[in-house]
Image (cartoon, helix red, strand yellow):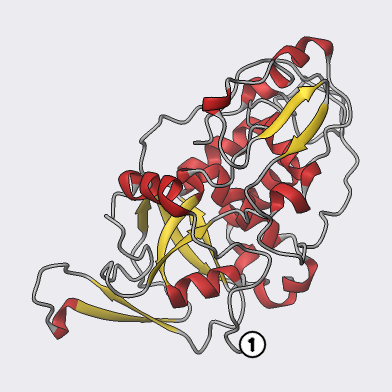
Amino acid sequence: MPLQPSPNSRATRDRHNTCVDRTRLADPNQGRCLVENCSIHRAIEYCHVMQRTWTFDKPNLMDSLEWFWRMRKGSLNLDSRYNIFPAGISAHRMFDAKQWIMVPHKDIVQKYYDSIKLLPGQVPEGTEYIYRRKTFPEVIEGEIFEYRLVPIQDMQDIAFTRQNDIMSPVLPNMFKVHTYPFDTLPTFFSHIQPKFVIVEAGDVLVSSKYHVQYDHVKQDPVIVQIMSIYQAWSTEVDDLDVDDEGSYYPPDPPEDDRDATYRSTNSGHTVKRRLTEKSSTQGTPALPSRKSQRTSRSGSGRGSGR
C-alpha cells in the first residue's frame, strides 16, 4: 500500500502547549523519534497511540475502558501525555496507517492478562474472563516501559535507520539500517502507558481485514494475550452492580481539573463529550457489538489520564 497522508481518523492538528509540553517532560527520550531515535530537528511529530477521535466515534468502547481501568465514567482523556509519543513523520504516518504496532514487554502483558483470567472455581464452567474493576493493575506515575515494533502490513519494502549514538557532530557509523521483519531493531523505552498500547494493538489485530496479512504474527503468544485482553476490555458495559456505581458515576471534578476531552457525567448517567473541536468529519469504523458476559463486578477506584 503506498504511503498516504495521515488518515482522517487521527488528529494531526497542533495540540498547542499543554499536552505537548507534558509529553516532552515525561518522555525519557527527550523528544527524539521513538523508532529511529533521530534528532528533534528532523520533522518530529506527536503521535497518539489510541486515536483521539475515538472519544466521539467509539463511545461504547470508551465507556468499557473507563469501567475496566477503574476510572470515572466520562473521564478518559486521549490527549493524555501517556497516550502520546514523539515520532518522525514517516514512522508516524505508517503507525496511523496501521502498518506497525507496538507490543509491551511480555511481563507487562502477562500482568494485564492475569487480571482478566479466572481462577478455577470462581465462575461457572465455560466462562473465560473475569470483569471486575478491582482486578485492574495499578501503574506507578512516571514509570518507563519497554516496547518492541511488530510489522502488520505493507512493511516488506520498508527500512528504518536508527541512530545509535546521539553525540554531535553526527558520523556515518552512528546509524544502523533495520529491514523487515525488524528483528534487529532495538526495543524502545517510553513513558506511554501499556494500557493504551494494548488497546491500539488489539484494535488492529482483531480487525478482520488484517487477518490474512499477519497470520505469522499470531503465532507469538504475547500477541494472542493482547487480543484476549482487548476483547475483554471492549466488552460492552450494559449493566452495573449497585455497589460499583459510586466509583463509576461520582460527582464531577472541579472545572480546573478537566481537560479539553473531559466527558462530563453531571446529568445522571448521561455522558456529555467535550472537545475543543472534532478534527475529522470521517469517523472510524464502529466496534462490533459484543454480548457482555455477566459475572460479578465489584471494586472501586479511578485512574489518572493526564
Front residue of 227 and 272:
272
Specify the farthest residue to the top: 243
- Residue 145: tell me if it is visible: no
- Residue 238: tell me if it is visible: yes
Image quarter where the N terminus lies is bottom right
Measuring 46% from the left and 73% from the top, which residue is drawn there? 91
Q: Would you identify the image quadrant in which residue 235 lies?
A: top right
Q: Secondary structure at mark 1?
A: loop
Number of disc labels:
1
Front residue of 109 and 93:
93
Q: Which residue is mark 1?
A: 1
Percent from the top left, x then y, of residue 31? 31, 58
Percent from the top left, x then y, of residue 221? 59, 54
Q: Would you identify the image quadrant in which residue 262 lies?
A: top right
Front residue of 182 and 38:
38
The amino acid beneath tag 1 is Met
96 up-or-down from 14: above or below: below
116 up-or-down from 109: above or below: above
Measuring 77% from the left and 62% from the top, which residue is drawn there? 283
Percent from the top left, x then y, of residue 254? 58, 20
Percent from the top left, x then y, of residue 20? 41, 51
176 up-or-down from 68: above or below: below
Measuring 68% from the left and 77% from the top, which residue is drawn there? 213
Is 10 left, or right, of 129 in this rendering?
A: left
242 up-or-down from 103: above or below: above
Is 210 left, or right, of 112 in this rendering?
A: right
Measuring 77% from the left and 67% from the top, which residue is drawn there? 282
Judge the density around disc 1: few (<14), some (14-19), many (≥20) Cα neighbours within 10 Å: few
